[in-house]
Amino acid sequence: MPEAPPPLAAEQGFDALVIGAGFAGLYQLHALRDRLGLRVRVLEAADGVGGTWWWNRYPGARCDSESHAYAFYFSDDLLQSWDWSERYPQQPEILRYLNHVADRLDLKRDITFDARVTSARWDATAALWRVATQDGRRYAAPFLVTAVGCLSSTNMPDIPGREDFAGAIHHTGEWPHEGVDFTGKRVGMIGTGSTGIQAAPVLAETAAHLTVFQRTANYSIPARNRPLDEDFKRWAKDHAPEIKQAMHSTPNGHAWPIGERSALEVDAAEREAAFRAAWEKGGLALRATFRDILTSRAANDTAADFIKARIREVVKDPATAALLAEIDHPFATKRPPIDTGYFETFNRDTVALVDIRADPIDRITPTGLRLRSGAEHALDVIVFATGFDAMTGALLRMDITGRDGLALREAWAAGPRTQLGLQVPGFPNLFTITGPGSPSVLTNMPVAIEQHVEWISDCIAQLRRTGAATIEATEQAADDWVAHVNAAANATLMPQAGHSWYLGANVPGKPRVFMPYAGGMARYRAICAEVAADGYRGFVTAGQAAPVPA
């Protein structure tokens, strides 16, 4: 006689549920619990806080926002109680920072770890979200906030023969926490996006041989990373209000301004000098040297040609340099990486570059990789630096079902539709922090996260004050916002990078839709404020709950 299934766990009720304990989930918990007084539970799949920075432990993992800007600015206590050590912090330091935040605000007592959400269903009768986790635990709350991150669902290409490989296979987004020893190993790395560009120099330091399999050549700018001196640390703390104001006034949420001149209104010598100064300083500010780098192809070409010339200067072998500089998209139309010695890595005798656009991978064999031409590459370890099912992947894999049995996967079959990247028609009381249709990955993420958390918290507070039970984006508002997101993207050069993960082009079968909002963080912040001030225009409230005084 078959065993009876174990009894379902008793459902636990809360005022709000938050999925994810990274930057977004931690601040959302603090805002709802400590400012609004709600009973909140955070559900986190990992066994610790950190979100993206808990999972991404690959060699070389490092932030591409400067550390003094990559932090919470809602709390002066948090700013004053933490010191960053480097201009661009590594993954372990960011993880320590997020644990510092969680401990300082006493957040961990309201987080359930090892709780991977497998379903979330809207119960219209009770006006509750009913959520289940992989281990059978059940939760319910009127409000559900997803804080799952834009880059958290790994993309593993379906290459035949993977199960036959005799060596080890790792994905950078799910790196073993005990680390990987590459000493004496023949390593193959597939992917040359931001992750691969960070990982390659570190892999090459210990591997007997590293083969980088490049499908798409990429721009990269030197990080010029360095330890922070005490004078700078003191300056950043003393000028926190000015830094915050600067980040809130720029399109990308960074503390440096966009140049006021066109790249085409200065002569070649002056333009070269400006680019070279930015190159020597390092970091993403090179793309802000002139105002029209992302809006004029002619202006963009000046930056692209400058970077390609630097690649050819750095890489000694002309054939390898040509492959690395054979970039087929405008500069910064894909996520622009910054690096620590990436192009220099190809000057090592133990590093090779293979062009898999010209000769694609046919299959994985027991001993390595075979290309379509029949060429074999013997490998002991294969590293997939192939990125993520960005922006929608983590949401869709949770089996979210809204009103009248509408599955989120069905609602987004032709691409994501949201109002402001915050709510989805047909999904009452579901909020998506940095969801598709918001600036998210085009910004310094903590700035975007703080704005979303505060908007969501204010919205929930308003519902409680008025006694409304639910809020939901309207179909018309979502249609209008998607049209505006497309118009904002088309006002830039970014859609011209046809194989970008901004468009979902890295995942076979995914709808080709430009997902982030390219109109700029400052403009987006103003739109969200206007919508709220106008009685949450584009949203509809319904039902009655007991009003709660502010």
Image (cartoon, rainbow, N blue to C red):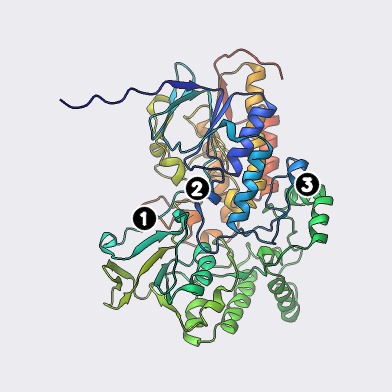
Badge 1 crowding class, 10 Å Cα cut-off, few under 14, some 14 to 19, many 20 or more, is few
Q: Quadrant of residue 310?
A: bottom right
Q: Is the residue under label 3 in contact with that under label 2 (CB below 8 Å)? A: no
Up the image or down, 129 lies above or below 23; here it is above
Viewer can see residue 518: no
Q: Which mark is residue 80?
A: 3
Q: Quadrant of residue 301?
A: bottom right
Q: Residue 318 carries which label?
A: none
Closer to us: 391 or 498: 391
Badge 3 crowding class, 10 Å Cα cut-off, few under 14, some 14 to 19, many 20 or more, is some
User: Where is residue 273 drawn, in percent x and y?
Assistant: 74, 78
Q: Which mark is residue 508?
A: 1
Viewer can see residue 415: yes
Up the image or down, 56 lies above or below 397; here it is below
Q: Label 2 to label 1, Cα distance in Å?
A: 15 Å
Quadrant (top left, top right, bottom left, bottom right) of the C terminus: top right
User: Where is residue 210 drawn, in percent x and y?
Assistant: 43, 75
Q: What type is the residue that disc 2 sits on? A: Met
Identify the secondary structure beneath mark 3. Answer: helix
Q: What type is the residue that disc 1 sits on? A: Pro
User: Where is residue 237 drawn, in percent x and y?
Assistant: 80, 51
N-term mark: 1 or 3: 3
